[in-house]
Amino acid sequence: MVKMDMLSMTIEQWKAFLQTIGEPAFRAKQIFHWLHKKQITDIDHMTNLSKTLREKLKENGKIAGAKEVKKLVSKIDGTRKYLFLLENGSVIESVLMQYDYGNTVCISTQAGCRMGCSFCASTLEGVERNLTAGEMLSQIYEIQKDVGERISGVVLMGSGEPLDNYDNVINFIKLANDPQGLHLGQRHITLSTCGLVEKLYELMEENLQITVAVSLHAPNDAIRSQIMPIAKKYSMEQLLKACKEYSDKTKRRITFEYALIKGVNDSDDCAIELASKLHHMLCHVNLIPVNDVKERNYIRSSEQQVRNFARLIEQRGIEVTIRRKLGSDIDAACGQLRRGYQNIEKMI
């Protein structure tokens, strides 16, 4: 029998299940509270439930969370990188970034990734499987327990393409937003995608208030197709049209992520062309000096060129930021730690 993934269940789903086993519906909120407020990992800790009900829960369900097997803490800025083990043996990464305004975590939505972006370590061995909504939440809960502080922001920017795991990601957002649970405002959730156009249109119809960050990384199809295989399926014109429609409908600003790679996409002409294609949209550009991945041949742009690129975009009326590099001494770039610890048996 396949057991229920308890952390992935909504209160309504709990009410429906409880009805099938002859238990009152009000127990649904109690169970949900234990899982998402108390964040327990053992059903027997639900002390206001009868032993009989707890046994029924153990018989039918499981709390399939993430188990911490490695943690690195940056001596430079306090950034924490976590390596988590899932129940099937898959390994994923999460990162805690501490700011003056609160704690933000970057979580994974898949074990690995199949998008193949050439500057990202997460794609080097493809995707193993999708994560459930509960496994995404579990990353947050385990980090909260570790630091003893509330998480106030979440970015779906770890390993995996969130829109390639659409249903589980939507369920995660709704569970994280639930007032009975983590109660994280949707505006404090950022979903990063390489641009699955059909899924962007689906997401638009959800009418969520999350922030969407699109990994653009090039001003045209010729360059983008060199570094992002997804560009061979969706043209820049198709992608930017979907982004414009998304922004118009939701009234939410789109963030365009742009990893600067020396000699590939960091020229003055690239900056000018990029600005010309975005000037009509509610958006801003987040420039990212590319992380070094030894399996790739890319070199990050110089600091001077990064600043110059930003200046050229800003002069043309596009808001731009330069991402501050965090955790440089602990392999905080996506996929780096996971690849460094492939033999999980040695870590347990």
Image: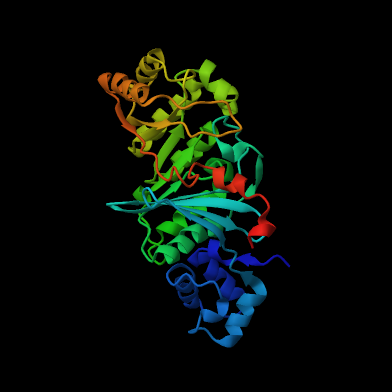
| Side (left or right) of 266 relative to 166 | left
Q: Residue at x 58, y 87 (%)?
A: 51
Tell me if residue 248 comes above or below residue 347 in the rendering.
Answer: above
| Vertical relation: 294 (above or below) 89 | above
Quadrant containing the N terminus in the rendered view: bottom right
Question: Seen from this angle, which residue lies furthest right?
Answer: 1
186 or 156: nearer the eye?
156
Kindly tell me whether residue 89 is visible in this rendering: no
Q: Nearer the viewer, residue 50 or 35?
A: 35
When asked about the image quadrant of residue 16, the answer is bottom right
Q: Residue 215: x and y, percent?
A: 47, 32
The furthest residue to the bottom:
51
In-image side of 44 versus 99 (left or right)? right
Residue 237 placement (x, y as % from top left): 48, 20
Question: Is residue 126 visible in the rendered structure shown here?
Answer: yes
In this rendering, is residue 116 above or below 41?
above
Residue in the picture at 63% in, 76% down = 58
Position of the C terminus, as image quadrant, is bottom right
Instruction: Kindly identify the residue that appears in the image at 46 percent across and 21 percent down.
Output: 262
Q: How many marks?
A: 0
Q: Position of residue 209 (x, y in %)?
A: 37, 46
Applied colour scheme: rainbow
Position in image of residue 85 (x %, y %): 61, 58
**Which residue is rendered at x = 47% and y = 69% of the image?**
39
Q: Is residue 90 left or right of residue 93?
A: right
Q: Is residue 166 above or below residue 322?
A: below
